[in-house]
Image (cartoon, rainbow, N blue to C red):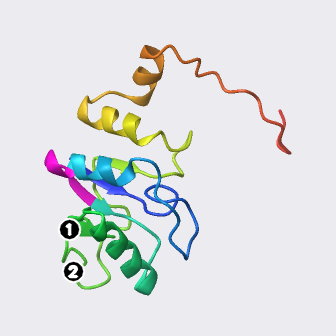
Amino acid sequence: MIIAVDFDGTIVKDCYPDIGSEMPFATATLKMLAEKGHQLILWTVRSGRALDAAIEWCRKRGVEFYGINQVFQGDERDGKNYARKPKVDIFIDDRNVGGLPDWGTIYEIITENRTYEEILLSEGHNHEHKKKSSWWHF
């Protein structure tokens, strides 16, 4: 699988432009996925020095990426005609609807080809959401 992974709020706690502390088991899970042959793409809003720092942070922890903000290195062609949304199998991002599952659940979803809903139901979780107060009421 080709897996696009966000950095801030996903691999590390969001402290942009600084680098926050690692989300529990993020790099260990990414290394296990890479070892199983999955191609990891770092897909982040970071650029320049902030991007270089994120890449180096991951590299020091043993996480190497197949591509950085592109499906594979060299994919950017002429600088105009590259995909704004990469063609990948899965996005791992803290801004998913429903938020970011823990990294153990992410690993299970990918390696066992299960949906998040299947995992929640099999564990007997009540996935009913409590109504939050909001300015937007029906």
Q: Earlier in the sequence, mark 1 or mark 2?
A: 1
Q: Nearer the viewer, residue 129 or 12?
A: 12
Question: Is residue 70 visible to us here?
Answer: no
Figure quadrant of residue 116: top left
Q: Which residues are magenta?
A: 34-40
Residue type, numbered disc 1? Phe
Residue 94, given in percent of the width and then of the height, sits at 51, 51
Residue 22, given in percent of the width and then of the height, sits at 46, 58
Residue density around tag 1, few if under 14, some if 14–19, many if 20 or more, within 10 Å: some
- Mark 1 — residue? 72
Indicate the secondary structure of the residue bearing disc 2.
loop
Residue 81 against residue 40 in the figure, above or below: below
Residue 131, given in percent of the width and then of the height, sits at 76, 29
Residue type, numbered disc 2? Arg
Q: Spatial distance from mark 1 to mark 2, Cα to Cα?
A: 11 Å
- Mark 2 — residue? 77
Residue density around tag 2, few if under 14, some if 14–19, many if 20 or more, within 10 Å: few
**Residue at image point 18% right, 77% down:** 74
Question: Is residue 84 visible to us here?
Answer: yes
**Residue at image point 43% right, 80% down:** 47
Locate residue 105 relative to residue 101 in the image: left or right.
left
